[in-house]
DNA sequence: TTGAATTCGGACAATTTTATCCTATTAATA
DNA sequence: TATTAATAGGATAAAATTGTCCGAATTCAA
């Protein structure tokens, strides 16, 4: 569904948000440990998220990553996915056709439409806050 | 959604089915031309489809690929996808966690469940015959 | 002001996916 | 039976994705 980079990005963002809610700034190292991801690769992904204004970074000693508490409920899963994987998730044709639309559909076009719409809707309505919810109480997990 | 290989596989199968309905056996070359795919790569994919008993191949001069007419309505999109991409499409965790299930869910587990179920259902109910339907009348397309 | 902790950014390496090439095998037909 | 047209399959190459390394820049604190 998503690229590995995107998966790491989502997990990292959730973890940063979770810590930010408790006013903790977190380091790359801490993030990579917590979400079980390769550190240097994760660094690249975090850079992308910073550039896309999804997370904030602070350089230097005591630096790290964080998200404004106010923003956590506003950021949607779709933004994270878009920042890393672009819009191919829900715009591309199921068969990879370049020109596939209602007027010139591929043979599976109609079958995919409602699923894509549902996926899009889900991504656009799922907030970062929602995704962090289960972490506190050990109801959801980011590792393994 | 699917790998490139899988996209080619689906398109090839649809084309073969369409021709088989008119009792035409088709060659690799013809298929690759018709679905706009690299010939040698397509050959590998067709081999996989043959091994998975989705299409039949006939070697030698006048050989090619075909599907029993009776089978065309029985073969489901899910079988083609499974033969090439395996079951990762609808079994994998949205965040790539190895251990993600109802008991130990990732933070997006619940959000993905219904979408995955819908996708699975769609793949399992969409038949090859259905997918060939629009081709005759130029209602659907396999190129571009 | 120096050292340590940290992100940033570029270059590189490994792996996976996509694609190509060439030979072997098979079958029709002249 | 020889030739030709086709699939099968192995080896290799190219491209994309994933992952690593290292030095530069920044900031804190001793």
Image (cartoon, coloured by chain):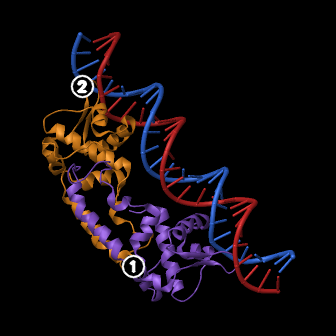
Chain colours: A purple, B orange, C blue, D red
Name the residue carrying label 1: A127
Q: Position of residue A127 (x, y in %)?
A: 39, 79
Q: Position of residue B33 (x, y in %)?
A: 30, 34
Where residue B19 appears, as percent x and y from the top left, is 18, 37
Q: CA distance from mark 2 to mark 1?
A: 58 Å
Give the quarter of the figure containing the N terminus of chain B: bottom left
Quick one: C11 or A34, which is closer to the camera? Answer: C11
Helix or strand or loop: what does disc 2 sit on? loop
Chain of the residue displaying label 2: B
* Above or below: residue B97 compared with residue B86: below
Which element carries disc 1, helix, strand or loop? Answer: loop
Percent across and percent down for residue A49 are 52, 69
Q: Which residue is drawn at the image coordinates 13% and 36% (left, top)?
A: B22
Answer with left or right where residue D21 lies relative to residue A46: right
Visible residue check, residue A137:
yes
Label 2 sits on residue: B62
Mark 1 Cα-neighbour bin, 10 Å: few <14, some 14–19, many ≥20: some
Return the chain for callout 1: A
Q: Does the residue at mark 2 contact the one at mark 1 (Cβ under 8 Å)?
A: no
Disc ID at residue B135 = none
Above or below for C6 versus A112: below
């Amino acid at each position: 569904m998503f690229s590995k980079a995107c998966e790491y990005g989502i997990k990292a963002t959730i973890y940063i948000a979770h810590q930010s809610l408790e006013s903790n700034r977190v380091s790359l190292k801490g993030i990579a440990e917590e979400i079980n991801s390769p550190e240097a690769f994760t660094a690249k992904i975090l850079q992308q998220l910073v550039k896309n204004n999804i997370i904030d970074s602070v350089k230097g000693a005591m630096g790290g990553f964080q998200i404004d508490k106010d923003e956590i409920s506003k950021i949607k899963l779709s933004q994270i996915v878009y920042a890393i994987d672009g819009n191919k998730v829900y715009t591309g044709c199921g068969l990879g056709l370049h020109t596939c639309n209602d007027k010139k559909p591929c043979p599976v076009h109609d079958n995919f439409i409602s699923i894509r719409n549902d996926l899009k809707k889900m991504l656009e309505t799922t907030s970062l806050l929602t995704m962090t919810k289960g972490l506190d109480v050990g109801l959801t997990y980011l590792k393994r």
